[in-house]
Image: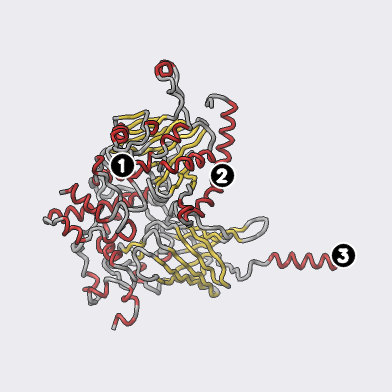
C-alpha cells in the first residue's frame, strides 16, 4: 500500500474515525474474555487509551499500538502462537500499513509475533538502500536495543531470522516521528534484561513499559540476560520522572504495563514504593549477616505476597527474593 | 370512543412519568456528622491504631511499615481519599442526579466532596463494569440499583487505598458495596469492603449526614511542592520491628499492645473483655 496515496489516506482516516466505536464494541468482547475459561483466555482484549494509542491485552502480556494516517506502530507482539490472532485484532483497528514494531526486550512472549506481524507490514525505503537490499521495504521495521538482537540471535532455540530486530540502537535512545507524534524509545540499562526499552508516545501522552512494570506479579529479574533488581527500581523512577499526573494524582500520562491493567503514575508509584521497601528490608538483613535461608524465613515480602506473590509457576516469591539476595550479596 | 382512547393514553403516559419502582431522591447538600468515630476521623488516628479492622498479618505489616513522611514525597502529596474512605474525612457532600433528557430515566447519580474535591459517578443505567484490565481510579467504577428506597452501590476498579489514614492499606482488588438510606433530612451510608489481600472478613462501617441547603463547597486546589530535599526514589518507611510509634497509642490509652494491632477479633465486643 502506498502511504502517500491520497485515496488510501482518506480510507485510513475513515478507519481511525471508526476506531472509537469499534473499540467500544471490543471492550465488551474483552470483558467477556476476562471472565471466561481457558479458550477465552486466548482472546485479545482492546482498550482505547488516549490519543492514537490502544492497549491490546493478551492472556499473559500486553501489546501497545499507535494508529494514524501514516499507518500502525506496534510495541511487542506476544507469543508466536498468538500472532495470527494479534494480527487479526490489529486489522480490526486499522488496515493501514504496519510500519514499525518495537521490541521492549528479547523474551519470546514479547517477540513471538514479530515475524508474522512484520511480514504483514512494509516500510519506506529508497535510493541506495533499495539498490543494495532488494527486499528492504517488504517488511515493517523492527526496532530494539542492540542487546535484544544479540540475545535473540544467540539463543539456543532462536526465533526465526524474520523475527529479529532490523533497526537497532546502542545509545540511550532512538526517536521516531510517526502519525504526527514524537515516539521516544528509551533504553533502560540492566533492568528486566540488559536490552530494555521504554516507549514514550509524547503527543498521546502514553508510556509503554515492557516487563519493567507489571501489575500482576513481582518483576521477573532475568539475571542471565543482564537484568538487575536495582535497574528495575531505577527504571520505575525514570517512568515516574516522565509521567505527569492530571488532577489529584490521577490520569495525565497513562502507562501500559508489560502485563496487567492500564495504569497511571500513581500505580507506578505504588509498585516502585513496594520494590524499594523490599530492597531496603533485604539490604538490612544482609547487613545483619543473614543467610539466604534466614532472609527467606524473615519473609521480607509478606505484606505484598497476597497481591504479587506466587507459590508455584515460573516466577515464585522464593525465586524473587533469592534473585534480590544474590544480586545484593 | 376517542375520549376513552385519549384517556387511556394519558393514563399510560402518566404512569410512564413516575420514576422506577423504589427510586428515591438523594440529591442535595449534605453536611457530615462526626459523632461516630470522631477522634479517628477529624484529628485523625494515632500511629499503630489498628483495632476494629479485620486486617490479616500482611495488612498489619503494611501498617507497621508505613511512615507518615511518605506524604511529603511529591508524588504522594495530592492523592485524594478513595471513594470507600472519602466520606470519613471532611465530608461535605453534594449529590445530584443526571437524567436522559428524552426519556427522563435516571442515568447516573453524582457526588462531590470537599477535601480534594473528588467527583464520583454512580451509573444507574444498568451498564456492566469494565474488564479488569481497564484503569483503576481513586473513585473506582460504581453502579447502583434501588432496593426499595435504599440505594445500593457496587464499586470495583479502585486504586490501592487505605482503611485508616495511618498506613493500613486497602488493596486494588477490593470490592466495595455501599447502601445509602435516607430518613427525611438524614442520610446514612453503610460501607462494606471485601479485600482478599488485606482482610480476613468484610469490613463494615457507617457515616451520616444532615441535609443542609445552605452548605457551600469551595474549590479545592492541590499543588505539588518539594518539601524535603531527598535523593530521587526515596521512600520513607519503617523496617520490620523498628517502628518507633509501636506502643504510643497503646500506652496513651492504657491498652494492651495486642489490642491495638487489629484483626477480626478486635472488631467484636467480646475482645474487650
Q: Give the number of the disc on residue A22.
A: 2
Q: Position of residue A182 (x, y in %)?
A: 42, 32
Mark 2: few/some/many CA within 10 Å (<14, 14-19, 20+): some
Mark 2 chain: A
Q: CA distance from mark 2 to mark 1?
A: 34 Å
Q: Give the number of the disc on residue B2.
A: 3
Mark 3: few/some/many CA within 10 Å (<14, 14-19, 20+): few
Kindly tell me whether residue A209 is visible in this rendering: no
Tell whether A268 sits left or right of A319. Answer: right
Q: Position of residue A325 (x, y in %)?
A: 19, 51
Identify the residue at image location x=33%, y=73%.
B264
Q: Residue furthest front?
A: A157
Q: Are marks 2 and 1 on the same chain?
A: yes
Disc 1: which residue: A238
Identify the residue at image location x=55%, y=43%.
A20
**Displayed quadrant of residue A104:** top left
Mark 1 chain: A
Which structural element holds mark 3? helix
Q: CA distance from mark 1 to mark 3?
A: 76 Å
Q: How is the image coloured?
A: secondary structure
Which structural element holds mark 2? helix
Q: Nearer the viewer, residue A89 or B99?
A: A89
Amino acid at each position: 500500500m502506498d502511504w502517500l496515496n491520497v485515496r488510501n489516506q482518506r480510507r485510513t482516516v475513515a478507519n481511525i474515525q471508526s476506531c472509537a466505536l469499534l473499540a467500544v464494541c471490543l471492550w465488551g468482547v474483552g470483558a467477556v474474555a476476562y471472565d471466561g475459561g481457558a479458550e477465552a483466555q486466548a482472546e485479545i482484549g482492546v482498550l482505547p487509551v488516549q490519543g492514537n494509542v490502544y492497549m491490546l491485552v493478551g492472556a499473559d502480556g500486553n501489546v501497545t499500538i499507535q494508529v494514524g494516517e501514516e499507518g500502525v506502530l506496534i510495541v511487542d507482539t506476544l507469543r508466536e502462537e498468538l500472532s495470527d490472532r494479534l494480527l487479526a485484532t490489529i486489522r480490526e483497528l486499522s488496515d493501514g500499513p504496519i510500519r514499525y514494531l518495537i521490541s521492549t526486550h528479547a523474551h519470546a512472549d514479547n517477540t513471538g509475533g514479530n515475524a508474522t506481524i512484520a511480514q504483514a507490514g512494509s516500510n519506506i525505503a529508497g535510493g541506495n538502500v533499495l539498490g543494495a537490499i532488494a527486499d528492504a521495504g517488504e517488511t515493517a521495521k523492527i526496532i530494539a536495543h542492540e542487546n535484544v538482537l544479540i540475545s535473540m540471535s544467540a539463543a539456543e532455540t532462536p526465533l526465526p531470522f524474520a523475527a529479529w530486530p532490523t533497526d537497532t540502537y546502542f545509545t540511550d535512545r532512538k526517536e521516531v516521528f510517526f502519525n504526527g507524534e514524537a515516539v521516544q524509545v528509551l533504553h533502560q540499562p540492566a533492568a528486566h534484561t540488559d536490552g530494555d526499552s521504554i516507549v514514550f508516545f509524547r503527543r498521546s501522552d502514553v508510556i509503554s513499559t515492557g516487563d519493567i512494570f507489571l501489575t500482576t506479579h513481582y518483576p521477573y529479574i532475568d539475571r542471565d540476560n543482564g537484568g538487575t533488581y536495582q535497574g528495575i527500581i531505577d527504571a520505575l523512577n525514570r517512568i515516574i520522572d516522565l509521567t505527569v499526573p492530571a488532577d489529584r494524582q490521577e490520569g495525565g500520562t497513562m502507562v501500559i504495563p508489560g502485563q496487567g491493567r492500564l495504569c497511571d503514575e500513581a500505580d507506578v508509584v505504588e509498585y516502585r514504593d513496594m520494590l524499594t521497601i523490599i530492597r531496603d528490608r533485604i539490604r538490612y538483613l544482609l547487613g545483619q549477616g543473614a543467610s539466604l535461608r534466614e532472609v527467606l524465613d524473615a519473609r521480607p515480602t509478606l505484606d505484598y505476597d497476597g497481591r504479587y506473590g506466587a507459590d508455584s509457576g515460573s516466577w515464585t516469591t522464593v525465586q524473587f527474593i533469592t534473585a534480590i539476595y544474590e544480586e545484593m550479596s | 370512543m376517542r375520549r376513552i382512547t385519549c384517556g387511556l393514553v394519558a393514563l399510560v403516559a402518566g404512569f410512564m412519568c413516575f420514576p422506577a419502582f423504589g427510586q428515591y431522591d438523594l440529591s442535595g447538600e449534605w453536611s457530615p456528622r462526626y459523632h461516630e468515630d470522631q477522634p479517628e476521623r477529624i484529628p485523625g488516628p494515632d500511629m499503630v491504631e489498628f483495632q476494629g479492622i479485620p486486617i490479616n498479618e500482611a495488612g498489619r505489616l503494611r501498617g507497621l511499615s508505613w511512615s507518615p513522611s511518605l506524604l511529603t514525597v511529591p508524588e504522594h502529596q495530592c492523592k485524594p481519599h478513595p471513594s470507600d474512605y472519602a466520606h470519613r474525612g471532611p465530608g461535605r457532600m453534594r449529590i445530584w442526579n443526571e437524567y436522559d433528557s428524552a426519556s427522563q430515566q435516571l442515568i447516573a447519580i453524582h457526588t462531590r466532596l470537599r477535601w480534594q474535591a473528588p467527583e464520583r459517578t454512580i451509573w444507574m443505567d444498568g451498564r456492566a463494569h469494565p474488564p479488569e484490565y481497564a484503569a483503576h481510579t481513586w473513585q473506582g467504577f460504581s453502579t447502583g440499583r434501588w432496593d426499595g428506597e435504599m440505594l445500593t452501590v457496587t464499586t470495583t476498579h479502585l486504586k490501592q487505598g487505605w482503611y485508616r489514614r495511618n498506613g493500613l492499606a486497602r488493596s486494588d482488588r477490593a470490592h466495595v458495596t455501599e447502601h445509602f438510606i435516607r430518613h427525611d433530612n438524614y442520610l446514612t451510608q453503610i460501607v462494606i469492603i471485601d479485600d482478599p489481600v488485606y482482610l480476613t472478613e468484610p469490613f463494615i462501617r457507617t457515616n451520616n449526614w444532615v441535609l443542609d441547603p445552605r452548605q457551600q463547597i469551595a474549590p479545592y486546589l492541590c499543588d505539588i511542592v518539594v518539601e524535603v530535599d531527598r535523593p530521587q526514589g526515596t521512600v520513607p518507611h519503617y523496617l520490620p520491628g523498628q517502628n518507633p510509634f509501636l506502643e504510643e497509642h497503646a500506652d496513651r490509652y492504657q491498652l494492651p499492645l495486642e489490642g491495638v494491632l487489629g484483626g477480626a477479633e478486635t472488631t467484636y465486643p467480646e475482645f474487650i473483655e
